Amino acid sequence: MTDWLVRHFIRNADDTASPAVRDSYGTMAGIVCIVCNVLLCVAKGTIGLIAGSVSIVADAVNNLSDATSNIVSLVGFRLASKPADDNHPYGHGRIEYLAGTIVSALIIVVGLELVRSSIIKIVHPSPTEFSPAVVAILVASIAVKAWMAHFNRTLGKRIGSVTLEATAADSRNDVVSTSAVLVAAAISHATGFDLDGWVGIVVGLFIVLSGARLTQDTISPLLGNAPDPALVRRIHDTIMAAPGVLGTHDLMVHDYGPGRKFASAHVEMPAEMDPLESHEVLDAIERHFADKEHLPLVLHCDPIVTDDPALRDMQHWLSEQVKSIDARLTIHDLHAERVDDGASMRVSLDCVRPRGCTLSDDELREGIAALVAARYPNAICTVTIDSDYVSTGA
């Protein structure tokens, strides 16, 4: 069913990096879910009122809230697809993250309301009717919600949407809650002990916890979480495979919404290489990512002297020595030159500070400078500390 809907209602469905295609996915998912949730709300609300079941009525209200969440998601996708303007040069993609956060908040509100109404039912019990109509509506609801969870999860993974992933999790919660309501109604009917309110509390707390987890997942991209390691590895490997490249570092990936990532990196090239040739190599890499992954990538060329044995020896020696400070330390952009008619030497280098390192930047600089001074007493050492912004073994 999901593939049929995609084939018939989404053009260029495979181009999931395109904002227009993402908008089509989000629009289709929103409309389908709104229709399903409104129908379920009307059916369960009617049966719940007739049967006098607070948990069924609460479940119906939950479906109405879900329809509201779907509207938020739909609006979020439409706004996120707006092109860049003067005030938002990177586009409006992060609105999709905001929509996912709002959906998560609505899930929490529904869970708290279910807990409240269930407590009232326990304090002021009322009889609950159990009939074939109740069973039929609840079973149908479970089946529809199970399909909706699969539907949204499939589309969410296909286009990398936290909003659709949140909607899928909400539908999964509904499967659990409605199943619990059905089981409670059956047990209450068989034993005469009314479990309606107690089950409502348990389900409500489950929904609240799920909403809290979803809120964390949707807020994380807004705070600037680490990029996908697979993307980092592709960028690294593609750069390293280009002719003449000696190394790469200082990779930064900025996320301005799904399908709207920007990246930059430094690329080490032989200093002896023709600058025009180096520039063409880097241009080719940038075009590759622009064409293949819709990823604007800006590369900076770091010229590395490769025909100086003394400098190569220093690079190799210091790369090993810094590991005595922290085994994860790496250095790059090492330059050395004689000054004062050769009486002293000026050494400059960059050191990547690994996450979790307990030493301060000043302590790292002092430690590395001490290593250099131990072997080169007349050296004036300047150390720049870089932060590690990606998770990769590169």
Image (spheres, helix red, strand yellow):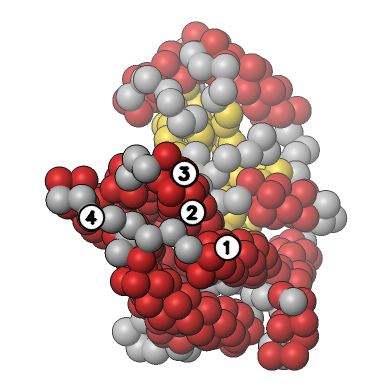
Q: Mark 4 against mark 2, which lies toward the viewer?
A: 4
Q: Amino acid at mark 1?
A: Val
> Which numbered disc, 1 or 3, marks the residue that appears first in the sequence?
1
Distance from disc 3 to disc 2, alpha carbons, whole Å, reads 12 Å
Q: Amino acid at mark 4?
A: Ser
Q: Are marks 2 and 1 in contact (CB under 8 Å)?
A: yes
Which structural element holds mark 4? loop
| Residue 198, percent from left and from top | 31, 42
In this rendering, is residue 312 above or below 118?
A: above
Which structural element holds mark 3? helix
Q: Residue at x 58, y 29 (%)?
A: 330
In this rendering, is residue 231 above or below 161?
A: above
Count of marks, rendered view: 4
Q: Residue at x 66, y 34 (%)?
A: 393
Q: Amino acid at mark 2?
A: Leu
| Residue 294, percent from left and from top | 66, 74
In the picture of the structure, the residue carrying the numbered disc 4 is 126
Viewer can see residue 76:
no
